[in-house]
Image (cartoon, rainbow, N blue to C red):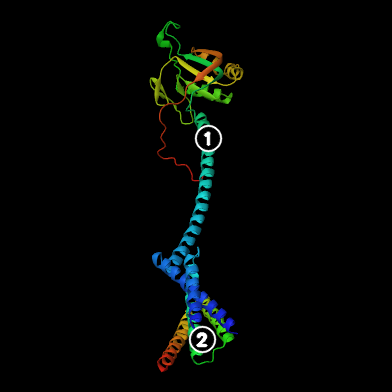
Amino acid sequence: MGILSWVIILGGLAIGVLVGLNVPFLIPQLYAKYLSVAILAALDSVFGGIRATMEDRYDNTIFLTGFFSNALLAAGLAFIGERLGMDLYLAAVVAFGVRLFQNLAIIRRHLLKK
Amino acid sequence: MNRKIYLSVFLVALIIGLMVALQFRTTSSIEQGVPFGRSQELSVELNQLNAEKKQLEAEVEDLIQKIQQTTKGQAEAKEVLAGELKKARLDAGLVAVSGPGIEITLDNPSAGQNKDPGDTMFVIRDEDLLRLVNELNGAGAEAVSINGQRIMATSEIRWAAPFINVNLTRIAPPYHILAIGAPKNLTSALEISGGLAEYLQSLGAQARIQPYENITVPGYTAPIEFRYAKSIKGE
């Protein structure tokens, strides 16, 4: 983890935020819920990736596929739940939320061990 | 290999930043505006109301059309009724009518005709007028009046000594009888030999018959009141 990687991460984040803030259109309210679940899944993947890096078993393919498929699956689950009249996105929120905190806890331990 | 990892990390960071920023903006805009559920509710309601409005508008149009039809029908009906009323009034003898006809002037034997007034026992009585009216009607008279009293379905000609009542009105000689009809027919009906004119003249009464191109028979003017007779329903 050199300075370059931090530059890449922060630079990507900054460009993404800048673009997101300046895009002329907004997500329709109808889809905002799906996007939020997708963000949660994506964050989970990111923290999973960080954890894997710290455990020295990071796999780029797994990271990328996990990132996209988790996000899409979470959004799709929320969408299907909406169609079925069931708050299925809660399942995604709970599952990804739990995993997110687990990953965070593991990352914290790795950081403390160093 | 390293470059690939950097690229994917950069891509993921970019996408996360984009999504978070977008979601942030969307959420803040939702908080400023109407809550999503509420707006959905309202839009559903709006759709319903729009549909309802459309339906009501169609109904209004339909009703307007019906009203127009009705008014059209009403105007027609009014016209028909007015025509019917006019005809009924004409039939009943409530309106003055004019046309070709004859005038009959009847008078009692004048006192000067006979030397002795006591001898002239004869006066024109209700029966004579009744016969006269009967003859006229028989000859096709369409309207008859005696001294301005139109003879209608309920008219009486009645001796109420020393006068004659027609339509509850006293009439006095000389009697002017107007009749509308074919003058020739009416005249010949009266002047037929052995007819009414001859009979009256033989009794000394003065009877004069005068045909006219155009005479006017007055209408019945007093109010008509039916106290007992009721029309049968549906007629």
Determine whether A103 is above or below B164 in the image. below
Determine whether B63 is above or below A56 in the image. above
Q: Quadrant of residue B186?
A: top right
Read off the chain for label 2.
A
Q: Secondary structure at mark 1?
A: helix
Residue closest to the far front? A3
Q: Amino acid at mark 1?
A: Glu
Report the front residue among B168 and B132.
Answer: B168
Q: Rounded to the nearest whole Å, what is the CA distance between mark 1 and mark 2? A: 95 Å
Q: In the rendered image, which residue does mark 1 sit on?
A: B79
Q: Position of residue B132 (x, y in %)?
A: 52, 21
Q: Position of residue B48 (x, y in %)?
A: 48, 61
Q: Position of residue A10 (x, y in %)?
A: 47, 76
Q: Position of residue B181 (x, y in %)?
A: 57, 21
Q: Is residue A26 left or right of residue B227?
A: right
The reply to whether label 1 and label 2 mark residues of one chain is no
Q: Amino acid at mark 2?
A: Gly
**In this rendering, the label closer to the viewer, 1 or 2:** 2
Report the front residue among B117 and B44.
Answer: B44
Read off the chain for label 1.
B
Q: Quadrant of residue B99?
A: top right
Q: Is residue B199 visible?
A: no
Determine whether B160 is above or below B30 in the image. above
Report the front residue among A67 and B60.
Answer: A67
Q: Is residue B154 visible?
A: yes
Q: Which class describes the residues within 10 Å of circle 2: few (<14), some (14-19), or many (20+)?
A: many
Dividing the image into 4 quarters, which one contains the N terminus of chain B? Answer: bottom right
The circle on residue B234 is none
* Number of callouts: 2
Residue closest to the far bottom? A113
Q: Secondary structure at mark 2?
A: helix
Q: In the rendered image, which residue does mark 2 sit on?
A: A49
